[in-house]
Image: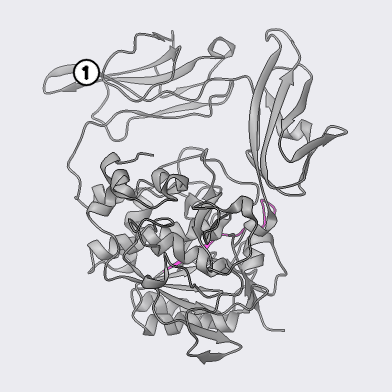
Amino acid sequence: MRNSISVKKIVAGCAATAVWLFGGLFLNASTALATNDIGFDAQWNLQVINVTEVWAISTGVGVTVAVIDSGSGPNPDLTQNLNAGRSLIRGRLGDSSTDVDTVGHGTHVAGIIAAQNSNTIGISGIAPNSKILPIRILDSRGDGSESDLAQAIRYAVDQGVQVINLSLGGATQTGGLQLALEYAAENEVLVVAAAGNGGQKAGTTYPAGNDLTLAVTAVDQTMNAPSFNQSGSYIDISAPGINICSTVRVDAVVDISRRCAGADEPFVTMSGTSMATAHVSGVAALIYAARPNFSALQVREVIIATAKDIGIAGRDEIFGVGLIDAYAIFKALGYFPDKIVFPTVSSLGQVGQESVGGTVQIPESERLQWYRCLSPGEATLAIPMDCVAISRAQRSVFIPTRKDVGSFLRFGTLITVGGTPQMRFSATTPKVTAIWTTISTLEVETKIPISKLLDTASTGKTSARILSGPCKIVRNILIASDSGTCKMRIIAEAKAPYPRLARTVVIEIVAKSEVTS
């Protein structure tokens, strides 16, 4: 049997012999107003990676990204940016049209990268003026062979692309694939690959597990890891991968609840590390357009070096180096002037869980101080009037206690600017709570015991009840029955030193068909 790859394996964990697809914060106001795409408001992902500010500098002009997938198009928001597609199935390279996507995955990935912007329809791609070279190696079931993948990589390199997007993968790799990746590296082509959607217990996915690729995993809107994410030292970086609005074929039959840029228009949401991978490829296209003489290694290094650290401090096996940040990349390249920067804070707002203050980007601090505040707020130079300094909290790490429940925390620093002492305050943390859920996203048909879903600083007995959504609790087990938003009330009975704790939480449930490599 041939080694294979597939969209499904990366998305939902198919057989080990295939190649699969993997699933399918600061907003510049002036840029947002100039973008008249009707689906732009649904693109939370663009705001999180700070890409709209970069469009004044680069939109991807002159850069071609190869999307080796299930084909791409047609779609009115994408077709203009599609080069002539190719089909490579069972070793046969044919001059197929771009209209070969029978799965829908490749079109969605391509739209994240290069959908046009400001054309009054649809969405905006991350590099809206870049070009896509679609190479179809996956059949109508989303399956393909590793030998076809290796040949497609070589073909893409020979066509002069700067970036290759691989939102697919399998459990192993052959010598042929290794040689193809080496060929791409020798020709200064950056290869970006999906880390996989097999969950925490899955093994390394390839080609993401190869050091010659940039391996990408997914985060949701709260910067948490979706339940389908894999983990491992091979993961390099994170990008948005939940409910991503993008293009599909004009004749695609899709669930109307997933429409995201007009009820009758060919734009839907998909989830998975496939979608996350396309974000990194799009940002790479922006870099190449601005710095056409950069080597693939230079592009990779600036992406890694400027990522926003999330999760535990430093590189980890869940998020890699952290979240890709387009603004930080272009600032590092010298395109944005210095501005006032503030201390940062990384916190889940949970009692007993570390809150970490960051001072890397500001001058050396003379004093650190944590504050307990009554209301949320952005970073500021002014002393927040509703904040009180917390005694014995003068280190970068602070662990919230029951005294902090219901409050918001700020991290403050005292520095000297031009000989004048100045306090700078971080934005606030989430409201501190003593009860929370451990998971924010589930796949349809997932069953999880309430005891594993809830966590609390209290020792009181926990329970939950459904308020609304496609979910139910049977014998203390939460069952995700359909895609949508599950709203729950979680409770911990009073147990000293805590009173009765209660909180309303939301869990996003995504269909397995939405999760792609």
- Residue 69, given in percent of the width and then of the height, sits at 54, 73
Out of 392 and 255, give the one closest to the viewer.
255
State yes or no: residue 198 in magenta: yes
Residue 141 placement: quadrant: bottom right
Question: What's under tag 1, amino acid-wise?
Answer: Gln
* Callout 1 secondary element: strand
Q: Name the main secondary structure of what is drawn in magenta.
A: loop
Taking 118 as reference, is 491 left or right?
Answer: right
Out of 12 and 504, give the one closest to the viewer.
504
Q: Give the residue number, with chain letter if any, for mark 1.
A: 422
State yes or no: residue 512 in magenta: no
Taking 283 as reference, is 61 left or right?
Answer: left
Taking 336 as reference, is 286 left or right?
Answer: right
Which quadrant does the C terminus fall into?
Answer: bottom right
- Residue 261, given in percent of the width and then of the height, sits at 49, 53
**How many numbered circles are shown?**
1
Which quadrant does the N terminus fall into?
Answer: bottom right
Q: Is residue 96 above or below residue 290?
A: below
Numbered range of the magenta stretch: 191-202
Out of 81 and 459, give the one closest to the viewer.
81
